[in-house]
Image: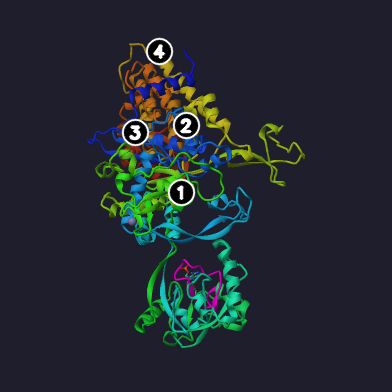
Amino acid sequence: MDRYNPASIEEKWQAAWAEQQLHRTSEDTSKPKFYALSMFPYPSGNLHMGHVRVYTIVDVIARVRRMQGYRVLNPMGWDAFGLPAENAAIERGIHPAKWTYENIAQMHQQLDQLGISFDWEREVATCSPDYYRWTQWIFLQFFQMGLAYQKEATVNWDPIDQTVLANEQVDSEGRSWRSGAMVERKLLRQWFFKITDYAEQLLTDLDKLTGWPEKVRLMQANWIGRSIGAQVTFQTEAGDDIVVFTTRPDTLWGATFMVLSPEHPLVKKLTAPEQAEAIQAYQSAAAAKSEIDRTAEGQEKTGVWTGSYATNPVNGEAIPIWIADYVLMDYGTGAIMAVPAHDQRDFEFARKFNLPIKVVVQPADQSIDAAAMTMAHAGAGVMVNSGPLDGVPAGKEAGQSVEAAVQWLEANGKGKGTVNYRLRDWLISRQRYWGAPIPIVHCPNCGAVPVPDAQLPVTLPEDVAFSGRGPSPLAKLDDWINVPCPTCNTPAKRETDTMDTFIDSSWYFLRYPDARNEQQAFDPAKTNDWMPVDQYVGGIEHAILHLLYSRFFTKVLRDRGLLSFDEPFQRLLTQGMVQGKTYKNPRSGKYVIPMNVADAANPTDPETGEPLEVVYEKMSKSKYNGVAPGEVVSKYGADTARMFILFKAPPEKDLEWEDADVEGQFRFLNRVWRLVTEFRIQNSESKTQPSESKPEKDLRRAIHTAIKEVTDDLQGEYQFNTAVSELMKLSNALTDASCKESPVYAEGIHALLILLAPFAPHLAEELWHSLRHTDSIHTQPWLNADEAALVADEATIVIQILGKTKGTIAVPVQAANSKSELESYARESELARKFIDGKEIKKVIVVPGKLVNFVVG
Ligand code: ANZ
Ligand code: ZN
């Protein structure tokens, strides 16, 4: 008998499937469609276990749907622009394109070894001109819709290398990755996408995403951050209006000063001559600080008085105007009214600078006194010292004070109710080479002019030097930069910024349905047919930006008339991490190389002798806990790797890599191999006739239970782990079956292989063919459970005497549901007779299907 040899069968079938184009997307529109999508990877060059997990999950989903009669789209591509390629160019002199395409080839080959059923004919790479041509075209759609615009924004500036740095190139101390210089902040003119126009839709449409994890919807909602409040206008002594945004307009009577962001345009005008020096110094200090530093809770408050006053519109009081860095320019209006009694940041500020505090909300249970307060009272209470609002209940739930305040402001022309979002416009320009060039020409006469469609793509020039110093490589290429204006032919200059790579990944799923189209980004008919994605699978790290941007693109292109749906991803699964075992010294925090741990049961630090902790953490080189997919595949085969990954944990949970469990799955596949091989050898032509014997009925029940359970586990909730357990149960039932000659046994072997096919595609294919089938197992129809076979013949009934359980009896299922029949079975049972023991039966209580209780005396 042949041994199970994964290496030979896996390679053989991978080649055969490719030859047969088995994974080509079916265009048979009489079938229902299913779009299975994995988040496409960055081509780093090395497949890691996290990749193996996502692609295996999606692969099983796709394979099951194909067998269930769907036409399935299961594509793959590469998120191929980005910084690492450029860093490789700077550090090692390899051109980013060469580096990227070599990595793609390597990862493609690693994926093939896993037997993933991607349709490679639809492969996309975002760095290829036939893809980014359309990225540029989409940019121009946004531009024409008024959704792409330029404004000044701060960037990270390396003063030594004279270059802009991405956030990832700035270390935690604020130094440049390359020169080590302290990074400065510098204002540059940059491109933005107006995602804020879609804030409300992006928020309310979250309700439609019932197939998404609640957690992800919540993260998106928080990111969009809708706040209801009011804009209130304050007038300065010089007659200028300062508009503030507040969520608590009801506390207006308690506003005792104002704070402007240091960047606020009115600061200059408001600054009194004697304050000018202090204000300017403060402004430059604030400019150098990051937003996180400025707004972190508990930060010591800083600020400077401008020397000017404004009038509180509700009571005519003159209140001083300050600047402070805790007020940000790009939130609300960049100015606030400060209510120190009821806002903690304002309270800290008032205490530090001795500004007045005025209580306007009194809590019900105590009376607060401004002088004695140690923190702001943000809670509920009743409005006081607030003119028309006095006596109105205030607070999140019961309060009507905010509403009342808005009414009052609107009636008196001093403000209006508004909604504010935390979401900002999306800064999309990067001063880098390895990205899609922004297809704009700057003309001295016409301004920003779109490159005409016929001239797309604006191709990245290849002959470029990468030094990591000075302006972006593109900005140094005079030949490339200088072009005539497309509109008026005057000498003009190309935009040298490239696009944020998040743009590339915001529409790739729209391209797959029509990936080879050379005339359009996609044929709307095809994309509308396949979209929305039925199941999207990827990492939780993309819960906010990638998913939000993709939703935004979908809505914009819908409004452009190209798409006929509102949301791109019907269902979303965020898979957990793959963690590896580490040996960690809890005192020093150091990780020990597993090879150096002498006694795995009692691990100690080889250097210090201290006891080590065994913990599972995300696989990483620095923790010596990585497992390379290639190693596992060459030792056990791809099928075992896939089975282990699916079996070890539910897909959304973290998974602890455990060699012993990998071994366990390998043994299971070996058992299946033997079962089927023995069946083949013994299963000569002489089969017995089917009969209704108990062993046959029991086996059929086991078979159809497995079909039902596995099918349920693969629908919607995706419990691959319990599905694998069901497969193991079925294989045990077959091993133990006493009716190996019966056709029922053959049915069982057949079912086991079909159900196993999506999980262990190579093994299932090999065994299927060993049973003299000539077509692929992957084109067989999925199985339907026979409900009749699921029904048990016998029911178990509890026998009680005087309410005490004495044991159980087995009765035919039909009898169990009839009171009289059940009673007679019970009376005649050995068990009841023994305990009744000749006593008088006074009463019999029968609960059909459950129990019979004899009251004896
Ligand atoms: C007065 C007030 C009184 C406020 C009170 C709060 C409590 P959310 O909920 O996050 O939207 N604010 C407004 N613009 C700001 C800016 N640019 N930088 C820093 N803070 C700003 O927060 C809205 C509140 O944050 C606003 O309501 C304002 O302070 C402050 F008892 O106004 B409030
Ligand atoms: Zn022009």
Where in the image, quadrant-wise, is ligand 2 located? bottom left
Residue highlighted by disc 2? 642
Residue highlighted by disc 3? 790
Instruction: Give, as a single range, the part of the protein colored magenta.
Output: 322-344
Is the residue under label 1 in contact with that under label 2 (CB below 8 Å)? no
Residue 785 seen in the current view = no
Distance from label 4 to label 3 (Cα)? 28 Å
Distance from label 4 to label 2 (Cα)? 30 Å
Indicate the amino acid at tag 2: Arg
Q: Kindly state the secondary structure of the residue where label 4 is placed.
A: helix
Residue highlighted by disc 1? 542
Q: Is residue 124 magenta?
A: no
Distance from label 1 to label 4 (Cα)? 53 Å
Sooner in the amino-acid sequence: mark 4 or mark 2: 2
Sooner in the amino-acid sequence: mark 1 or mark 4: 1
Q: Kindly state the secondary structure of the residue where label 3 is placed.
A: helix
Sooner in the amino-acid sequence: mark 2 or mark 1: 1
Distance from label 2 to label 3 (Cα)? 29 Å
Residue highlighted by disc 4? 682
Q: Nearer the viewer, mark 2 or mark 1?
A: 1
Is the residue under label 3 in contact with that under label 2 (CB below 8 Å)? no
